[in-house]
Image (spheres, rainbow, N blue to C red):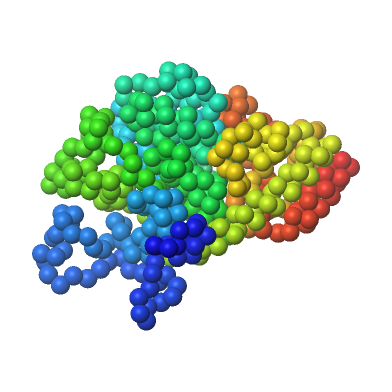
Amino acid sequence: MGKQITTATKCVHAGYEPGKGEPRQMPIIQSTTFKYNTSDEMGRLFDLEEEGYFYSRLQNPTCDMVAARIAALEGGVGAMLTSSGQAANFFACFNICETGGHIISTASIYGGTFNLFGTTFRKMGIDVTFIDQDASEAEIEAAFRPNTKLVFGEMLSNPGLKVLDIEKFAKVAHRHGVPLVVDNTFPTPVFCRPFEWGADIVTHSTTKYMDGHGVQVGGCVVDSGNFDWEAYPDRFPGLCSPDPSYHGLTYTKKFGKMAYITKMTSQLMRDLGSVQSPQNAFYLNMGLQSLDCRVRRHNSSAMKVAEYLHDNPDVKWVNFPELADSPDHALQQKYLPEGTCGVIALALKGGREFAHRFMDALRLITIETHVADCYTCILHPAMHTHRQLTDEQLLEAGVDPDLIRLSVGLEASEDIIADIRQAIEAAKC
Ligand SMILES: *Cc1c(COP(=O)(O)O)cnc(C)c1O
């Protein structure tokens, strides 16, 4: 990439540079398989002796170009696309934490990840301890066990909008010889690059701002290449000891800084197959090209909407980290000084009944199980995404039972504010 050093430029160019007479836009290589001339050539690919494409479940050129763009945006050494954000978080953890392992996660995380950790991982014999995002270093320390393999947190939690104190979590994780995995879906690398603060692995639901148009579900795992797995061979045997499914190859020995991401593609993706399709990767590429300007617009509009809500007597509370009285404002100033995202958490006076009437009265803003695309949309987690949880579990997951999640899209902020104003008035009748 040479001189193309800024994020906005990487969004447009990283990962694909056409040669003479080649397509200006990234091509979609819509092919399951790839041709070779000799049997020996093919054999060497299966031994990971040579690099090359052979089957799109393991690697596909379009997916790799998009993964390389996201790796460049995050400042990592490599990345792998997955079929969804759920798959990304599953792969990121399972690559280094198997049955008998233990994970420490902050409790303020996306509901789907909370279920993955609390239900499915437990069924697989992986234990997860949830801790408060505001836990002190000593409290985080106390959660460690001899079999702890990683610490997990969300840079900006969905839907609570809590900001992760990465430096604090990275410090404690590294003191115990485990990596910090950060889900950076909401800020995107435009507003925060967690590796710069000590995170080791970054995950994304690319379904959100990276796609940005609500067209396809996808995910990504990025490796910083910084974690020294070899310093803890007994804790990470999957990376530091021979893999019998590749004739006894050891990932750290053969691939160095690329060990984690190579194991993930050549072993886990081979066996679990949650790939992103080349067509979807192409849509994601289009979303990434405008990511920098879109998220800045989402963020500045959300700030105007948040200020309107903040001064509205019918609003019980509003949380947007840029607001000076937001509980995580200091953390926002440190880690996300240029902006957070376009999502606002709020509660209306008058409780759930009023919230119901308000949402039904909206005209421009739509009720959707989604966030972070071009359409302004709204959801009441306790009544929708999180309705399986009791009020107590909601609070444990950092979700106030009155919380309304408003995702500010790319419409003009005046129109969004006007719709909120008329719906509040309508709900009073
Ligand atoms: C949506 C989301 C996920 C899950 O991603 P999918 O693409 O829906 O599978 C994970 N983490 C965060 C923060 C999310 O917002």
Determine the image quadrant of residue 241. Answer: top left
Tell me what residue is drawn at x 44 percent, y 75 percent: 24
Quarter occupied by the N terminus: bottom left
Number of marks in picture: 0
As drawn, the residue found furthest toward the right would be 429
> Of 276 and 157, which appears nearest the observer?
157
Q: Nearer the viewer, residue 194 or 51?
A: 194
Q: Residue furthest front?
A: 3
Q: Position of residue 10 (x, y in %)?
A: 46, 60
Q: Position of residue 249 (x, y in %)?
A: 15, 45
Instruction: Examine the image and state in which quarter residue 70 appears.
Output: bottom left
Q: Residue 92: where, in percent of width, then height?
A: 37, 42
In the image, residue 114 sits, relative to residue 188, either above or below, namely above
| Residue 30 shown left or right of residue 214 in the figure | left
46 relative to 332 in the view: left or right: left
* Residue at horizontal 61 percent and vertical 47 percent from the top: 339
Q: Kindly identify the residue that appears in the image at 16 percent across and 40 percent down.
A: 242
The residue depicted at 71 percent of the width and 33 percent of the height is 325
Inspect this view and state whether residue 125 appears: no
Q: Would residue 427 be visible to someone looking at this image?
A: yes
Q: Position of residue 106 (x, y in %)?
A: 49, 30
User: Dividing the picture into quarters, in which one does residue 35 lie?
Assistant: bottom left
Which residue reaches farthest left? 40
Quarter of the figure that contains the C terminus: top right
* Pick the front one: 75 or 308: 75
Q: Is residue 91 above or below residue 71?
A: above
